[in-house]
Image (cartoon, rainbow, N blue to C red):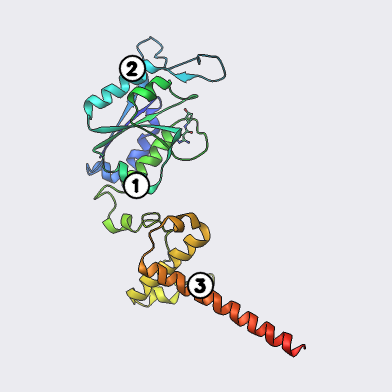
Amino acid sequence: MDFTVLTIFPEMFDPFWQHGIIGKAVAKGQLGVSVINIRDFANDKHQVTDDRPYGGGSGMVMKPEPLAEAIRSARQRLPKSRTVLLTPQGRTLDQEQAQALAGYEGLILVCGRYEGVDERINQSLIDEEISIGDYVLMGGELAAMVLMEAVARLIPGVLGNENSAALDSFTENLLEHPHFTRPSVFEGEAVPEVLRSGNHKAIDQWRLEMSLIRTFLKRPDLLKAKRLSRQDIDILKKWCKDIENIIAAQSSSDSDSLSSSG
Ligand code: 4FV
């Protein structure tokens, strides 16, 4: 995977590409990364990349000429890349979208600033608009980093062991189970016994139940969208049974107390 970022603040990306798992993947050549300063394509002596909006109003707009030149130069270098504009107008990034983007040879990420980019760039040179969430940032740079990190983790070899990406939250439309590590007791709180049992069938069952209950409580929308497995359904039915029993027990004790109170 080759990431090419177009920005007027290239220095923001150095620390991102030099640290952690991304830094190692770049060093190992599993990820190609390059940054293009849009200013380098502004041909006036002050390398201006923004101008006042037609129709008036506050703020500035990114000029089309430097952007178009910068995008075309990136595409020349990586013709099979997908060109993405980071903007609140875009489809909100999710794990499924990250998986789809990880399938491309390269991604050209256009980082807007000011009020945004001239719409003619959007119409003619952008393949896809992506947002990282319904809030407004100063620029697309942080959104580009979020997208790159979400996609890079899905590139084979980038994460130490392949499985961990496969077990990610959202991959199965479920939130992840709780995680514990040593010490086995922390401030009086013990690690669930099953996790120290060595019984991996029981551990997997416990983890699935924890994922299902957390998703049910915190993100029922995900559970509604999920293709439930036989095992998922058995667990959910067991809970329904447990809840019915509690209600049944409650109503029988009520009737007892009612009958006894005559
Ligand atoms: C954004 C987002 C975002 C809008 C105007 C940059 C800013 C400025 N990008 N997801 N939310 N972009 O707020 O991706 O140009």
Q: Residue furthest top?
A: 45
Residue 135 located left or right of residue 200: right
How far from the left and from the top, in percent, is residue 250?
Answer: 63, 80
Q: CA distance from mark 3 to mark 1?
A: 44 Å
Residue at x 31% of width, y 41% of height: 101
Q: Quadrant of residue 144?
A: top left
Q: Which quadrant, please, contains the N terminus? A: top left
How far from the left and from the top, in percent, is residue 46?
Answer: 41, 12
Crowding at dot 1, Cα within 10 Å, few <14 / some 14-19 / many 20+, comes out as few
Q: Name the amino acid type tagged 2.
A: Phe
Element under disc 3: helix
Q: CA distance from mark 1 to mark 2?
A: 32 Å
**Where 209 falls versus 258 (above or below)?**
above
Element under disc 2: helix
Q: Quadrant of residue 63?
A: top left
Which residue bears the numbered disc 2? 41
* Mark 3 CB near ligand 1 (8 Å cut): no
Which residue bears the numbered disc 3? 240
